[in-house]
Amino acid sequence: MKTRLLYWIVLASLALQSCELVADVSPFSQQKKRTPLVNLMTNQTVQWYDVKFNQSYGENRFQNYDVYVPHVDSLDPEKKSVSVVLVHGGGWSLLDKSFLAEAAQHFANQKLNITIFNINHRLAGIDSVTFDDMMTDFDLFFDHHDSLKNVLNLSDEIVLWGYSSGGHLALSYTYKYDKRNIRAVTAIAAPTDLTDETINQGMKDDKNRNLTELLIGQPYEENPDAYRRASPYFAVDRQCSTILLFYGGNDNLIKPEQGEKLESLLTKKRVQSEFYLLPDANHDMHGKMGEIVSETIDFMKNL
């Protein structure tokens, strides 16, 4: 009897040790400890930015970007910069990177060790481009970005920053396509759930074109699953990148509820996130970009 009791005690002890070993090798415990962004952002004295316009990352005429490279006192290969990648809005089918030139300059005015990329992507409604093609553009850009790491002295740390439809694309690329190398996403006035009728029926341009139909390539009624697959909201999991959300209280196109719904789910999943409501702001965030960039910088410094 004593022998049998001793046997079960030893077995229980081994089981406990086994559980401890399993806990030690969980995905969270194995994650590489990442450098605080503030250390990278402030590790060099930035005098000004060298700006190069209309650089190509692909063969298509829309696959280009502007880059703002920090000019530092003395280049130290060990003191690499953080990449901030801006993605313009325009209902997936309009506008270009010039729309965010003001935001890029606000980032540059901070004189921090960040390299700013202001990118274009192919547009819906031209050459049958749809959501998947835009995600391919992001892949192409980041492959190109990685090829510049030594040339521009870039770290592995990336913050993706998108306005309106650009915010939707930034969230989609990071969450749906499992891009864990992206440290954080900032989305401004971004649609997050395309299955919402206010989005799939309410987003139209001055020609009365339904912009989500252009993005997906089909009306919602014909393929609701495609709208769901293109919605960041339905791709959230516990390991999602950190997110910062901004919405305007007077935005009649993308209601703040789009962000509140996402932020609520992120909280339930225990994903680090912050939500800002700008009570007097409308969709174009006129006069608010400086404030949004400043809040983004503060947010980055705490990552």
Image (cartoon, grey):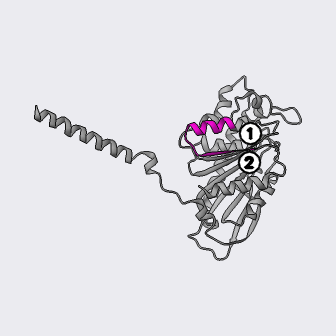
| Picture layout, residue 265 above or below residue 41 | above
Kind of residue indicated by mark 1: Val
Quadrant in the rendering for residue 135: top right
Tag shown at residue 121: 2
- Residue 16 in picture, x, y percent from top left: 29, 41
Which residue lies at the image location 55% right of the left edge and 41% below the top edge? 270
Which residue lies at the image location 67% right of the left edge and 76% below the top edge? 73
- Does residue 275 show up magenta in the picture? yes
Quadrant in the rendering for residue 23: top left
- Residue 93 in picture, x, y percent from top left: 79, 41
Q: What is the secondary structure assignment of the residue under circle 1?
A: loop
Q: Nearer the viewer, mark 2 or mark 1?
A: 2
Quarter of the image with the C terminus is bottom right
Which residue lies at the image location 57% right of the left edge and 43% below the top edge? 271
Which residue in the structure is indicated by mark 1? 129
Looking at the image, can residue 59 be seen?
Answer: no
Q: What is the secondary structure assignment of the residue under circle 2?
A: loop
- The mark that comes first in sequence, 2 or 1, is 2
- Residue 109 in picture, x, y percent from top left: 76, 64
Quarter of the image with the N terminus is top left
| Picture layout, residue 179 above or below residue 125 | below
Estimate how packed mark 2 is, as few (under 14), some (14 to 19) or many (20 or more) residues with alpha carbons within 10 Å.
many
> What range of the chain is rendered magenta?
260-277
